[in-house]
Image (spheres, helix red, strand yellow):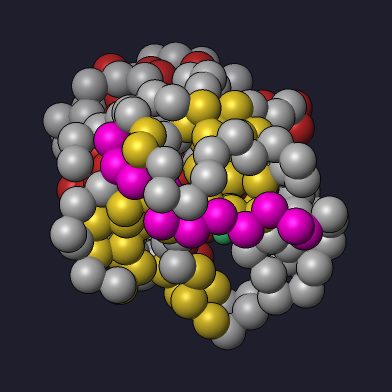
Amino acid sequence: MGNSRVLQDADNQVNSGYGWRASTGSMHLGVDLVKWAGQLAFVIAHSDGVVEYVAKNVPGYLKGSFGNQVVIKHNAHEKTRYCHMKYGSITVVEGQQVSKGQVIGYMGATGNTTQPHLHLQYEVDGVAVDPIGIIGADLPGIYANLLVDGSWGDKTTKALQKALGVAADGNFGPISIKALQTKLGVRADGVYGPITKEALQTYLGVVADGDIGPITVKALQTKLNNGSF
Ligand SMILES: [Zn+2]
């Protein structure tokens, strides 16, 4: 499957990525997509397929539940699962053929959530894998999928560049530094010195001592991962 949308509008972003969640001590098996300012959006089929499963009787909060959901089988191996959909909004039935881009319902907050969002799972041979590869191009918000290891390498630089809207070439040179300085509200002189470093630390909410060590880099990687940089 190539990239295509799962929400109608482009201004959605990943609120929470696929992977281990320290807060719950469990794996998060999909990505959570939200709209700016808590708006709702139509949920649309990622690509052609057959509706394999529909759950539509969850009126609101339900602990441990995906709420109202639709599972679309795209081929012998791949399925997408759309969860927490708004009660009464699902427009498809089991066995129905759907086309890429077809509206299947509305984003909601049913099941184990209080915030409206779309939990999207991408399952290959029954195993939930990171959906970002199939929807990544949809997301103007950055979702970097970085290892939060405190080590500022090439991937971190590229993710930062993407978040700053400059060419993601891995070269943290004057253009990137100026974009960072503009974002941080300090003089954009392209020099990555103490003022810029301390401003970056303040922005990240860590101690502003000018020492860009593992704690600062972890904070940076976390923000890049969750799209909040
Ligand atoms: Zn989720």
Q: In which quarter of the image is residue 3?
A: top left
- Residue under the image location 48 percent in, 58 percent down: 53
Q: Outermost residue, front direction?
A: 95
Give the answer, above or below, for where 7 lies relative to 153. Answer: above
Query: If the picture is divided into quarters, which one holds ligand 1?
Result: bottom right
- Residue under the image location 70 percent in, 29 percent down: 40
- Residue under the image location 50 percent in, 69 percent down: 28
Could you tell me if residue 228 is visible in this image?
A: no
Give the answer, above or below, for where 64 lies relative to 189. Answer: below
Provide residue 177's location: percent of width, then percent of height.
35, 26
The tally of labels here is: 0
Front one among 38 and 190:
38
Q: In which quarter of the image is residue 97?
A: top left
Q: Outermost residue, right direction?
A: 60
Look at the magenta stretch and give its main secondary structure.
strand
Instruction: Tell me: 115 left or right of 175.
Output: right
Specify whether residue 51 is painted magenta. yes
Instruction: Look at the image and give the residue range highlighted in magenta.
Output: 48-58
Q: In which quarter of the image is residue 158?
A: top left
Instruction: Tell me: 96 left or right of 77.
Output: right
Specify whether residue 78 is painted magenta. no
Provide residue 45's location: percent of width, then percent of height.
41, 35
Quick one: quadrant of the N terminus?
top left
Provide residue 15's location: percent of width, then percent of height.
58, 47
Could you tell me if residue 6 is visible in this image?
A: yes
Front one among 94 and 48:
94
Provide residue 192's location: percent of width, then percent of height.
36, 33
Front one among 185 and 37:
37
